[in-house]
Image (cartoon, rainbow, N blue to C red):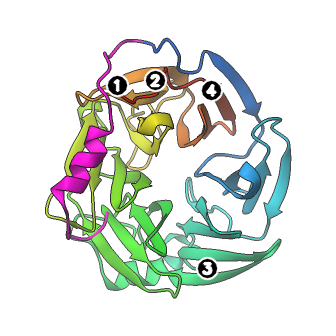
Amino acid sequence: MPSKRTLQWVAVAAVVGMIVPSPARAQSQCGGADAELLVTGLSGGSGSTVGPGGALYVPDPVAGTILRIDPKTGDITTFATGLPKRIVGTGGAMDIVFVGSTAYVLITLVGPDVGGSNVVGVYRVDGPDSFTVIADIGAFAVANPPDTQFFVPTGVQYALETYRGGFLVTDGHHNRVLRVTRDGDVSEFRAFDNIVPTGLAIWGQTILMAEAGPVPHLPENGKVVSFGPRSATVREVASGASLLVDVEIGRGRTLYALSQGEFSGGPPGAPALPNTGALVQVNGDGTFTVIRESLDRPTSLELIGNTAFVVTLAGEIWKFENVSCPPYGVSH
């Protein structure tokens, strides 16, 4: 989704070089042998983050709330309420990040172009039921339409990540990454062809991004790529997993990605078929190894130590321990 600048090849090489080759196989020998259904009964799934105290923070876009989840016990408390609620099949509160102890939430598909009356953008959480809109992404999108085809003028923003004192936001509909400052300035960081950018992870100045690929989201178009603020090109790190929706950096700087699964054949934006998703590890040869399969339309991935937490559209959070095999991606 973002703009068109260029990263030094040295930084890209560093990111790609930190991934150690390992043979692709049907199932990892480590990778979530210890699986636990940590949470059920959520009204849906979207993004997530690890916040203060090491807890998981997960938006509930249907209810317009942010939930705090104990990663050990699965106990749920309400962190914030009163955010704009989802009004179409997706959207509402999509993702959350923290800057220190302050939470920022990405809200999408709530504007007049889809029958809503709220601002599409980044909201700062000021209290349990109070918020401030710090960036009107919808207004920027309407005033600065993308070069690729679209039918939602305000876009469909997917992921929010902290970056250089501000934020990066992917827009999977407008095919770009936006730069947002905490003062509310919005700009195009990098623009793409029709690749449907989704999840983000940051390593220093280098941005790692998941691509779902255009409809029908074929496996060869599901990619993890890397680029930076001055990159002339985007570097493909790995490809071959259907409808990628997230990427994270794990122990030993090993990369993991989240495949939502086999596309359902529905309209653009429709989720994958149930129980076809997978947690995958990035191999040094540009392929993926399946860590855990048969996930039900996963949307977001977090890693705490050697444990993965996966949020799904089925309203579940799964916990997979021991996702990395020793020596955790570091060569000797």
Amino acid at dot 3: Ser
35 or 19: nearer the viewer:
19
Disc 4 packing (10 Å; few <14; some 14–19; many ≥20): many
Taking the image as shown, residue 108 lies to the left or right of residue 8, namely right
Amino acid at dot 2: Pro
The answer for how far apart the CA atoms under marks 2 and 1 are is 9 Å
Residue under label 2 = 327
The answer for how far apart the CA atoms under marks 4 and 3 are is 39 Å
Q: Residue furthest left?
A: 232
Viewer-nearest of labels 4 and 3? 4
18 or 207: nearer the viewer:
18
x, y (%) of residue 78? 83, 57
Query: What secondary structure is found at the residue carrying circle 2?
Result: loop
Q: Are marks 1 and 3 in contact (CB under 8 Å)?
A: no
Residue drawn at x 35%, y 57% is: 207
x, y (%) of residue 171? 39, 63
Q: Are marks 2 and 4 in contact (CB under 8 Å)?
A: no
Q: Is residue 178 visible?
A: yes
Amino acid at dot 4: Phe
Q: Earlier in the sequence, mark 3 or mark 2?
A: 3
Q: Are marks 2 and 1 in contact (CB under 8 Å)?
A: yes
Label annotation for residue 332: 1
Query: What secondary structure is found at the residue carrying circle 3?
Result: loop
Residue under label 4 = 320
x, y (%) of residue 175? 30, 61
Q: Earlier in the sequence, mark 2 or mark 1?
A: 2
The residue segment tinted magenta is 1-26
Residue drawn at x 31%, y 27% is: 283
Residue 25 lies within the magenta run: yes
Residue under label 3 = 117
Q: Earlier in the sequence, mark 2 or mark 4?
A: 4
Viewer-nearest of labels 1 and 3? 1
